[in-house]
Image: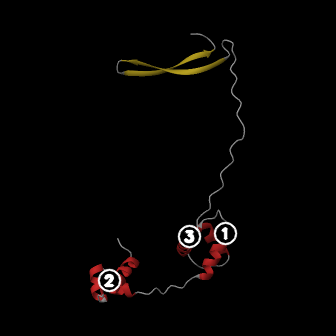
């Protein structure tokens, strides 16, 4: 699917490059003539955009929903969809948190005593009987010879 802006550019290119009429260029590119001539009537929203940008810089971890709440508290009558559209057009995003610092230094190893039965652990041994496999824990003491 091609956007209307791209179709407008295609019609302008065909008219300029090949000297075609608007009617013929629209037919070739598959654009409607009214769409090509359309001029947006939307207000620029400069004041609201500026306030939205200020709030986003003050509160870097706030997304468009929380900024919408702040604007509502200030008395802004705009809806959430309009705020979201302006938020995207301004290129605003929630800033990422800084990475946590890693632990500095070396970790102390676990000491293993050299005497028998000092440390116990479980080991799961797998036995196969034909097509049937079972798994059961076996207890072993480190330091003991088996």
Q: Quick check: 97 above or below 133?
A: below
Q: Quick check: 131 above or below 43?
A: above
Looking at the image, which residue is at 27% across and 83% down? 27
Q: Relative to 1, is 91 on the left or the right?
A: right
* Quarter of the figure with the C terminus: top right
- Alpha carbon separation for disc pair 3 and 1: 12 Å
Task: Report the label total.
Answer: 3
| The furthest residue to the top | 146
Residue on which the image places disc 2? 14
Q: Relative to 93, is 16 on the left or the right?
A: left
Residue on which the image places disc 3? 91
Q: Earlier in the sequence, mark 3 or mark 2?
A: 2
Callout in the foreground (3, 2): 2
Disc 1, SS: helix
Residue on which the image places disc 1? 57
Q: Relative to 24, is 79 on the left or the right?
A: right
Q: Quick check: 110 above or below 23?
A: above
Which residue is more in the foreground, 118 or 91? 91
Q: Earlier in the sequence, mark 2 or mark 1?
A: 2
């Amino acid at each position: 699917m091609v956007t209307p802006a791209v179709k407008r550019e295609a019609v302008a290119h065909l008219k300029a490059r090949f000297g075609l009429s608007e009617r013929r260029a629209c037919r070739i590119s598959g654009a409607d003539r009214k769409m090509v001539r359309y001029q947006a009537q939307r207000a620029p929203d400069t004041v609201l955009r500026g306030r939205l940008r200020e709030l986003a810089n003050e509160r870097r971890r706030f997304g468009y929903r929380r900024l919408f709440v702040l604007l509502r508290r200030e008395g802004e009558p705009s809806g959430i969809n309009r705020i979201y559209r302006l938020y995207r057009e301004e290129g605003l995003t929630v800033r990422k948190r800084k990475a946590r610092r890693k632990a500095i230094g070396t970790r102390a190893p676990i000491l293993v005593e050299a005497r028998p039965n000092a440390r116990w652990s479980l080991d799961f041994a797998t036995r196969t009987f034909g097509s049937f496999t079972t798994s059961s824990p076996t207890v072993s003491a480190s330091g003991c010879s088996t």
